[in-house]
Amino acid sequence: MTTTKEIRMMIADVDGTLVTQEKVLTERAIAAVHKLHDAGILFAVTSGRPPRGMSMLIDPLKLTTPISGFNGGIVVDREMNVIDQKVIQQDLVKPMFKLLKSMSLDVWVYQGAKWYVGNRQAPHVDREAWTVKFEPIVVNDIESITENVAKIVGVSDDLSAIQMATEAAHKEFGSHVSAEPSQPYYLDITHPEANKGSTVEYLAAKYNIPSAAIATIGDMPTDVLMFERSGVGIAMGNAKPDVQKAARDVTLSNEQEGFAVAVERFILGLS
């Protein structure tokens, strides 16, 4: 079993993990990351968010590592320059739109740094714009955007529809896409290699760190591949049982400073 003394990098999910339900980066979370820096442990973030939606984390966390957005679909540096990008196969984009709409899901499209929606007033658009700190581009025919699509999101507050759409995407598109909920109401669809497990592999190779010396932390099914490809996988207390079961350790919820507790207890051995 990997011990805390062997950890050389920690990779964290953002929503539901690093920040609270109100998307607040707490002072204790900031202090925990600074303690990692002081211990010589690299820290990186990965999320279903677009890269620009994580730019507000760079300065308080003193990030120097690449930022992985769209669940690994795009990797950028601190200045938001694209280092690596994986896009959805173009001939699959329209069939994916059709599948999501058949389940009555709203559709969002991410192309490079741009975020497109069909209806600015649709559920979760306003909240997402507040979270990522930039506005979407509203288009009349979102289905016309098929080239260089980094991520498609199906959105619904009908959580059973999200689950059914996830299962249908797996059945219809198989290994040609990655399709997993990043939040209970978001179904993220990306290139099949655009997943958080690939993010672990990318960062491990970049910094010449064995995967066994990497710790990962998250709360959603999209984070399970990180757990599987790292030495220490930590699930948040707010994660569902199947996600917790996939992790080596379980911390408190993101409303109880679970991220900071995990750093202090499982990585630095302070408590």
Image (cartoon, grey):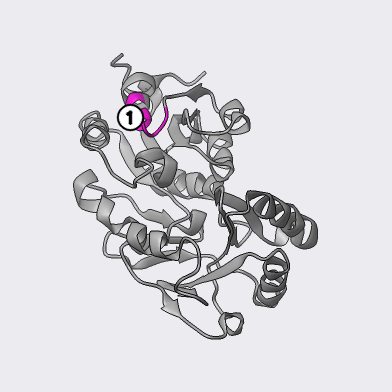
User: Does residue 255 belong to the magenta stretch?
Assistant: yes
| Residue 24 visible | yes
Using residue 191 as the reference point, say whether residue 167 is left or right of it. Answer: right
Query: Where 46 falls versus 246 (above or below)?
Result: below
Residue 39, image quadrant: top left
Callout 1, which amino acid?
Answer: Glu
Left or right, residue 239 beside residue 65 = right
In the image: residue 95, left or right of residue 131: right
Asked whether 47 or 43 is in front, the reply is: 47
Dividing the picture into quadrants, the one containing residue 68 is: bottom left
Q: Is residue 79 above or below residue 65?
A: below
Say if the magenta span includes residue 59. Answer: no
Residue at the spot of label 1: 257
The residue located at (70%, 72%) in the rendering is 92
Residue 183, image x and y in percent? 53, 49
Horizontal and vertical percent for residue 80? 31, 65
- Residue drawn where x is 45% and y is 43% of the image: 204
Q: 205 or 98: which is nearer to us?
A: 98
Q: Residue furthest right?
A: 171
Relative to 109, 64 lies left or right: left
- Name the spot of residue 123 as percent of width and height, x first: 50, 63
- The relative height of residue 53 versus residue 90 in the rendered view (above or below) is above
